[in-house]
Amino acid sequence: MPKSLLDLPVPAPSFWVKREWDRADIVVIGAGLVGLLTSIRLKEKFPRRSVWVLDQKSHFFAASWRNAGFACYGSAGELLDEAKRSSLDSAYRLYERRFRGLHALRQEFGDAALGFESSGGWEMFPTQEEAHKVVDQLESLNQDLHAIAGQFPFQPKAAKSLGMNFADTAIFAAQEGAIQTHLMMRSLRQKALSMGVELYEGVHVHALEAEGIYWRLNLALGWDIKAKSVFLCSNAYSSWLQDSLDVQAARGQVLVTSPIPDLPFRGIFHADEGYLYWRSLGTRLLIGGGRNQDFSGEHTFESQTSAPIQAHLMRMLREHIVPGKEFEIESQWAGIMAMAESREPIVKTIAPGLLAGVRMGGMGVALGADVAVQLAGLLEP
């Protein structure tokens, strides 16, 4: 007698399953933010076509459910770092895509449905010298970004009142904020279903194969289905189905504290060129990042936390963010992002009927809506 339902073998599909679940017009692989938004745009564009969204696990395990809930465009320090890695034009183009995408997401669903809090975002620095390296370039950044943001996006501010152990000067971005991830994902899921998108979880696609005008999807369930068009929207995991995609898995680790009485600040915060980030959750604190402490170790598909990175996050909390405050850790988790040398998303047609919208670079909340519009636009009527 099996000890659990999970021990039972996968049953053969019935006649009815094969009849109903044989082929679709469009299949989107990945039920996270980008996949759901893409399915919505596709259903708007092709209301008579069947649109299925497949995900290998319950949607609670999607990477989009495991993010930190930051609604940001990129700190000044991060943009300058991107300019060094690529070019200033590339950094500005990425900022514009994030700005446009987040604005579109808020316009479509409304701030209440996303749990959006217009708190502003802070960039903190370890020393005054480091702060002034970025502050001294703000005038040029602000002038160049004014046309995108509609205002000067970055202002230097005194940071002493925040009670943190960082430089006295910080940079404030008034247009940034935070979302409640569970509310965002609920809103996306409900809209997709209401439009007739069919959402199937626990469906792992092993392989894809072109077959005439169709793509054959080989399922771990034990049978195949066909689709005229397939959209890869599972970010880093898409590389398992299409190894030509320039994406690399990058683990993001997060922890949340117990309530901290008299927390002296609210909002979202970045340091270390965006590799460290934290935010208030009521009187709790969420902190994440730190993968630059061990780049090679954090290039993984394993969604477990690791002791060295968690220790780094704890050290930053105790020594720099809330020094002298008492707290416990209530939650710890990790999610998988998609990175590469380029931080530009990949939005392209790989082959006729096979398209990809991946490599969000840890900024899927800001980029997702813009990527979905562009990706759906690639499919011809």
Image: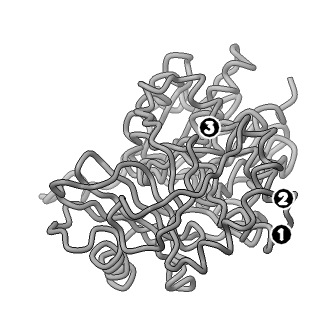
Name the residue that disc number 1 marks.
86
| Vertical side of 264 occupied by 277: above or below | below
Q: CA distance from mark 3 to mark 1?
A: 23 Å
- Horizontal arrangement in the rendering, residue 369 relative to residue 271 (left or right): right
- For badge 2, the amino acid type reads Ser
Q: Which mark is residue 315?
A: none
Name the residue that disc number 2 marks.
90
Which quarter of the image is occupied by the N terminus? bottom left
Q: Secondary structure at mark 1?
A: loop
Residue at the spot 33% in from the left edge and 53% down from the top edge: 265
Q: Could you classify mark 1 by the number of other residues whose Cα lies within 10 Å: few (under 14), some (14-19), or many (20 or more)?
A: some
| Vertical side of 221 occupied by 194: above or below | above
- Horizontal arrangement in the rendering, residue 293 relative to residue 235 (left or right): left
- For badge 3, the amino acid type reads Leu
Q: Which circle's residue, 3 or 2, is located before the other in the chain?
A: 2
Q: Secondary structure at mark 2?
A: helix
Q: Which mark is residue 102?
A: 3
State which quadrant residue 108 falls in: top right
Q: CA distance from mark 3 to mark 2?
A: 18 Å
Q: How is the image coloured?
A: one colour
Residue at the spot 38% in from the left edge and 55% down from the top edge: 279
Which quarter of the image is occupied by the C terminus? top right
Percent x, y for residue 189? Answer: 47, 30
Q: Can I make out residue 246 in this image?
A: no
- For badge 1, the amino acid type reads Ser
